[in-house]
Amino acid sequence: MADVHIHVEGLGPAGAAFALRALERGHHVTATEPKWPDLTWPATYGVLEADVPAWADKWFHPPHDVTAHTPTQRVLPYRYRMMNKSALLGDVRLAAEQGQLTVTAATSHTSHADIVIRSHGATRIDIALFQLAVGYVFASSARTFSSFDAHPHPDIDFRWHQPEPRFMDWRKTSNASEFPPSFLYIQPVEDGLLIEETILVTHLQPHEQLDELKRRLHQRLECPEFRDFTRSAKITREEEVIIPMATRARAWYRPTTVVDGKRQFYFGANGGLIHPATGYSVGASLNAVDETLDFIAGKQTTLARLGAVFQRELAYWLRQIGGELIARADHSTLADFFDCFFRLPAPQQLAYLTGHSGVEVMKTMWALRRETGFNHPFLQPLWKNPRSVYRSVKRRIQHGGD
């Protein structure tokens, strides 16, 4: 099925990548974006290097090493990449200026499309799990991405006071046990260095947590490790992150057919591509683009499609359970759990973090059980109160339209 008219609703990073890839594969593409032409993406987007397909490489900064503190310090056996938002958004604008992509603020093209991609962002409901973060971006003389691999000036070491990129730092700074546990996240961004305090997963509503997160971040920044850097570097902006997780309007791999015969796909966060135990969605969305376009083009056999759906659904359920367990755990439990997780071989860690195969996710979870033992506090809800865990997971999944 060549030159299909695909209409993308919502040009966040997932929708923008889908639209540009569909154009590259020869389809007629239109899009709706309410914020057009003044579209910006204020959030920060990072992905595992393994999650960046070759066709999307140009939209990401070079990979860099990241560390984890659980509190054991280790360099993780895979690398991390930050999205070059200017490059991706610039390609969208260029495609629009050249007449390849028609973008409007209203749904004027939907009625003429063969396929509608609903990429409206995360579904917000009362029963969602949330990832929350508060951070500051600091400008500094060593803020460029290349500075983490080589000094920009050979005779000057700028890095003596600048924190290195950090995937998770679970070292505790607060005794506020009534609030969910949080960790420190540090990454280079286009306008400086982001230092962010993050609640990985919580049942609590966002407004109840952001002030405490900011207090914890300030407490971190007064530690000797950061004090010289934060007092010498200017804060350029503040970032707040609120991600509703473990919800979807409908699974991205289960299209619907509307009355006039056109098919609708729910994509990105709207299609459940947010990892319910990590909050990441961009990498998963990028990897789902070609699979969705292949399905639209009729390139998948029925058997292959059924197999793919089984793998995706199994991974989704397993990671839902993981997200629920994280939301129930205290700080010391999570720190020890992630210490066990980061001891696993790199392929097993990546299998869980990327979640492309349900069977591989299951294997990783079983291997992790060997590290923790069944009596680890993180796993105890599974056998002490399995009905409660199951009901919570099932209720969120049933909220979707599939």
Image: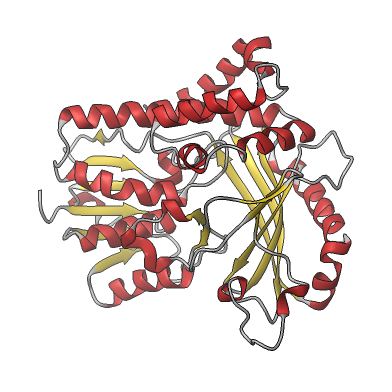
Residue 128 image position (x, y, % from top left): 58, 33
Q: Residue at x 63, y 48 (%)?
A: 242
What residue do we see at 37% from left, 52% from top? Answer: 286
Q: Can the viewer see residue 127 in this picture?
A: no
Q: Which is more toward the observer, 169 or 86?
A: 169
Using the image as rendered, state which of residue 237 and residue 288 is in the foreground. Answer: 288
Q: Which quadrant would the C terminus be assigned to in this image?
A: top left
Residue sitting at 52 percent across and 52 percent down? 78
Picture colour scheme: secondary structure
The answer to whether residue 43 is left or right of residue 199 is left
Which residue extends farthest left? 1
Question: Is residue 26 rendered to the left or right of residue 369?
Answer: left
Which image quadrant for residue 157? bottom right
Q: Position of residue 183 (x, y in %)?
A: 73, 47
Rendering coords of residue 274 (x, y %)? 49, 42
Task: State left or right for residue 40 relative to residue 309.
Answer: right
**Is residue 161 at least partly visible in the picture?**
yes
User: Is residue 88 placed above or below 391 in the rendered structure?
Assistant: below
Residue drawn at 15 percent across, 33 percent down:
301
